Amino acid sequence: KLLVSMKSAYKQIMCNLMDKIHIYNFLDDNDDFIKMKLLKVERNTRWLTTFLVSFILMDWLLWSVIPLRNNIINKDRIANRTIRLETCLYMWMPFDYGYEFRTWLITHAMNVYLVFTGGLVLSFNDSNNFIFIFHFLGHVDILRHKMRTYFTVKLNDTDTKGKIVELIKYHSFILSTFKDMEAGFGANVTLNYLQNLLNDSLLLYQIMVGDKANRLTYLFMMQFHMGGLIVMSFALEQIRIKTEDLALDLYQVPWENMSTSNQKLLIPILLRMQTPLVFEGALGLQTGVRPLASIIKSTFSYYVMLKSSIE
């Protein structure tokens, strides 16, 4: 995920967040709907980020404390060199940290920091995904609101043309933002699906039949990875659902009250709205609820296969 964040497309969309994409840039003192939508997006982002960071910090705490607890319980066996000192991350070192307490303490302290940093990288990357998804969904709702309210009052041809041009520009902004999101976050989203496909069955096996001392640790890991994937899949599915019927709202615009030139202006945007937006990850992965369901099925299938092969 660190390599993905180094892509030029990722850097570009991150630079555009506060200047162009954030709903705050579209606030209108006369439109309470946009204010309400901004508050909802910020609230959802805050709660979801808290959820991700809380689970990863709890998992980090367990990864740090449980090896220490096991070492205290098994101190006599460690002194007899029957078992090795446990830590949370095993790497090659130019010194022995399996039986020497001082070198183990240095190694464990370094590992605790590395696991903490890695956990924050995971949670912050996923939080960035949700920030853009929630703001994008907010823009789709704002566009729908504009189509439903702009033409409810009587307008002359000039004002009607101005409103139509504003809708066209806003819809073009939504389409360009969607393409930038696919380019910037497509690889990250695909990695999330791939990671869950490979890891969830192993985590489930550890929860069901693994060491009781580490069961809670793997449970928090499962909730972080699977919970984040479920929320992300439903959020990406909402993009398809919300853009699928945008054309219906445009059909409800009072075309009969418009001049022929204004009606012609609406035709191109109407044609573009016929196709729903489906977020496509790297390698052409179609995201949403269907791949999520496939991963959940595969998780239980791999778990049963893994359990039967080991037994």
Image (spheres, rainbow, N blue to C red):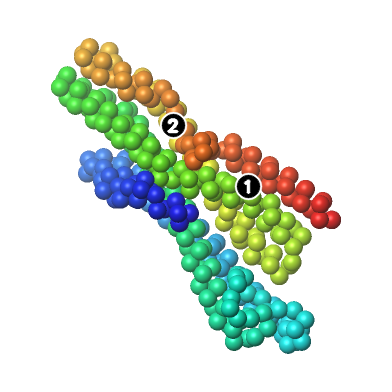
- Residue 268: x %, y % from top left: 31, 20
Q: Secondary structure at mark 1?
A: helix
**Which residue extends farthest front?**
94
Q: Is residue 45 visible?
A: no
User: Counting residues from the N terminus, which is met first, the one under dot 2 or under dot 1?
Assistant: 1
- Residue 10: x %, y % from top left: 38, 48
- The residue at 42%/40% (across/down) is 182
- The residue at 30%/47% (across/down) is 16
Q: Secondary structure at mark 2?
A: loop
Q: Is residue 247 above or below residue 74?
A: above
Q: Is residue 108 left or right of residue 121?
A: right
Q: Quadrant of residue 154?
A: top left
Q: Is residue 266 above or below residue 309?
A: above
Disc 2 marks a residue whose amino acid type is Leu
Q: Is residue 213 left or right of residue 224?
A: right
Q: Is residue 167 left or right of residue 159?
A: right
Mark 2 crowdedness (10 Å alpha carbons): few <14, some 14-19, many ≥20 = some
Q: Is residue 213 above or below residue 152?
A: below
Q: Which residue is mark 1?
A: 197
In this view, the residue in front, 273 or 309, is 309
- Nearest to viewer (mark 2 / mark 1): 1
Disc 1 marks a residue whose amino acid type is Leu
- The residue at 63%/43% (across/down) is 295
Q: Is residue 228 visible?
A: yes
- The residue at 37%/45% (across/down) is 9
**Which residue extends farthest right?**
311
Q: Which residue is mark 2?
A: 277
